[in-house]
Amino acid sequence: MCRMNRLQKIVGLVVSGIICLTACLSLGSSDSEKAKKEKPLVASMTSSPEIPDEVIFCGEKIDLTRYNMHEGFDRELTSFIYFHSTTMLHFKRANRYFPVIEPILKANGVPDDFKYLAVIESNLDIRALSGVNAAGFWQLLPGTAKQYGLTVEKEVDERYHIEKATEVACKYIKSAYKKYGSWAAVAASYNGGMGRISGELSKQNAESTFDLWLVEETSRYVYRIMAIKQIFENPYKYGFVLKAENLYKPIECKEVEVSSNIEDLAAFAAEHNVTYADLKQFNLWLRDRKLTTAGKTYKILIPKESELYYKKPNTKVHDSRWVID
């Protein structure tokens, strides 16, 4: 009986194969047209995004009709659109951190669009550290951070202090704008350095950084900023569907001023009814297990206990364009 069943199965498979092969061989042009009208065999479809003729960056109109600019923008927009998980996280994290960054940019007279520079520099990951030791939201190098007044030592690294690091980024941006008079050139110099950008403008006899032949990372840099801005301003258009409850809520903290040494930060955290992990999460600039103040006064953030839980859906939405509800 079992042998008979196996034989029947084999015969059935052979017949099915012959039928399938016959169908494939007899597929004519009319069948091809029919196939095009049928639903795709894959679970999803991938389409190329429409590239605008121009975009606005920091109030400046950027013409994208030239081949290299059209293709440069296309590459970055497509990359962000189909790198779904990371781009989705950008929105979620921005809901917590843009309210911190934006007022500082405004107070320093820096265009609001530069918050997108922080997005592409660090993915708004508070622990971001590059292979060349650039750290924090703004990926500041130790030398640059110290040049602009930040402390970068074993116990304290203020590159991870969001507010202080943003102030330094503003100083650099304003300094670069005095030199170039173009916000796009400023953005390029943030990645490539003012010395390199100025040198290449001179050597290549070019007036715009968009016309320069640079290392690939710097060539892509400004397009990446403009592309992520495009998505942040039109998330649903590019396939990102979020609700308020999906965004990471801002967490309210109280400030504790400290002017004397702390020998054990874990014990300090316990005294304030938070875990050591929470203390580090909200004060990542504390790089050791202790803090030596050396005559300075530091402000340590202590998250409020009630803010640490998602007991109810988040309702705090920084930008209404990000959500569908």
Image (spheres, rainbow, N blue to C red):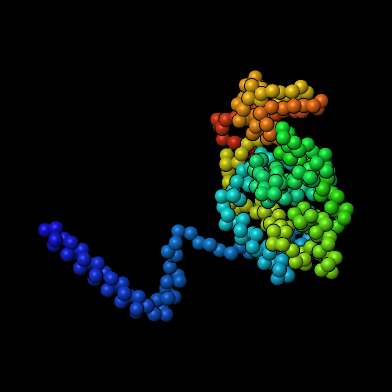
Quadrant of the drawing holding the N terminus: bottom left
Q: In the drawing, does residue 194 fall left or right of residue 47? A: right
Q: In the rendered image, is residue 63 in sight?
A: no
Residue 165 in picture, x, y percent from top left:
76, 41
Residue at position x 17%, y 64% in the image: 8
Q: 210 or 240: which is nearer to us?
A: 210
**Which residue is depicted at the point 65% across and 32% down?**
280
Kindly tell me whether residue 293 is visible in this rendering: yes
Q: Position of residue 277 (x, y in %)?
A: 61, 30
Residue 206 in the image: above or below residue 293: below
What residue is at 59 percent from the left and 36 percent from the top?
314
Residue 209 sits above or below residue 88 on the image = below
Q: Quadrant of residue 150?
A: top right
141 relative to 108 in the view: left or right: left
Residue in front for this viewpoint, 276 or 70: 276
Q: Residue at x 42, y 80 (%)?
A: 29
37 over 251 or under it: above or below: below
The foreground one among 265 and 180 is 265
**Furthest residue to the top?**
271
Residue 282, given in percent of the width and then of the height, sits at 67, 33
Q: Quadrant of the C terminus?
A: top right
